[in-house]
Image: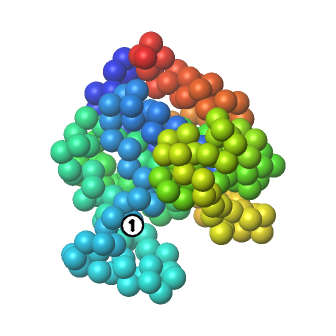
Amino acid sequence: MHTDGSGLHVVLTGAPGCGKGTQARILKERAHICHLSTGEMLRAEAQKDTPLGRDLKAALDRGEFATDEMIIEMVSNRIDLDDCQNGFILDGFPRTLPQAQALEKILVQKGIKLDRVIEIQVPDEIIMERILGRYSCMQCGQGYHDKFLKPKVYGVCDVCGGTTFARRRDDNRATVQNRLVNYRMLTYPTIPYFEKEGLLSCVDGTGTIESTAAKIALVLGLAQKR
């Protein structure tokens, strides 16, 4: 087990709204490794004037998803950059079984060993409550929640003092239900795959952000690090 972040390679998985992004950011600070969010990477890549960037932009402009091939090429290129030499956290990838199998192949080619796949487990009804309550400051993007994370002063952003807030259009019951169905169909098959590889650890994500972070640190042997 790791006592520091050196060469730590982790996949964070779980249903939409389980807290992957939040936990990845905490783990990044704790283990001093790179946080690779496929959503952010796709947006950045689509702005580049490269063959892959142009293909991605065209697909996204048509309202289509990026293909497995595009995402795998993007992740493979990103892992090669200097800031990933100490390790990385993959957040939102692999999203399908073919992506999981492709990830294993590219890591073998690069001589990288995946240390752990951590599934953050949260029941659907809690996910629904979390997602439907989310909103953010329109000025600086700081995220809030109706129940779990309210601004200190009602109607005023803690970070920039902004007074306009918005919810994501797709944060509605029907869309969230649809995303959960897609997750079960497409992403969930990666869970038994990683379990068979002996890489899977499951963490209960229903508690506070801090308690979930502590459980993840424990799984990775980082519990002593502050």
**Farthest residue in the left direction?**
82
Residue type, label 1: Arg
Q: How is the image coloured?
A: rainbow
| Residue located beneath label 1 in the image | 43
In this rendering, the answer to whether 224 lies above or below 95 is: above
In the drawing, does residue 109 fall left or right of residue 196?
A: left
Work out whether 28 lies above or below 68. Answer: above
Image position, residue 66 (x, y; %): 44, 74
Residue 54 at x, y percent in the picture: 29, 80
- Residue 198 seen: yes
Q: Nearer the viewer, residue 9 or 97?
A: 9
Between 194 and 42, the residue placed more toward the observer is: 42
Residue 185 visible in the picture? no
Secondary structure beneath disc 1? helix
* 186 with respect to 47 (left or right): right
Q: Nearer the viewer, residue 32 or 68?
A: 32
The x and y percentages for residue 134 are 67, 52
Q: Could you tell me which quadrant the C terminus lies in? A: top left
- The number of numbered badges drawn on the structure is 1
Query: Would residue 39 be found to the left or right of residue 188 on screen?
Result: left
Q: Residues within 10 Å of mark 1 (few under 14, many from 20)?
A: some
What residue is shown at x 23% (from left), y 43% (from top)?
83
Residue at the (47%, 53%) spot, across then down: 140
Q: Residue at x 44, y 83 (%)?
A: 61
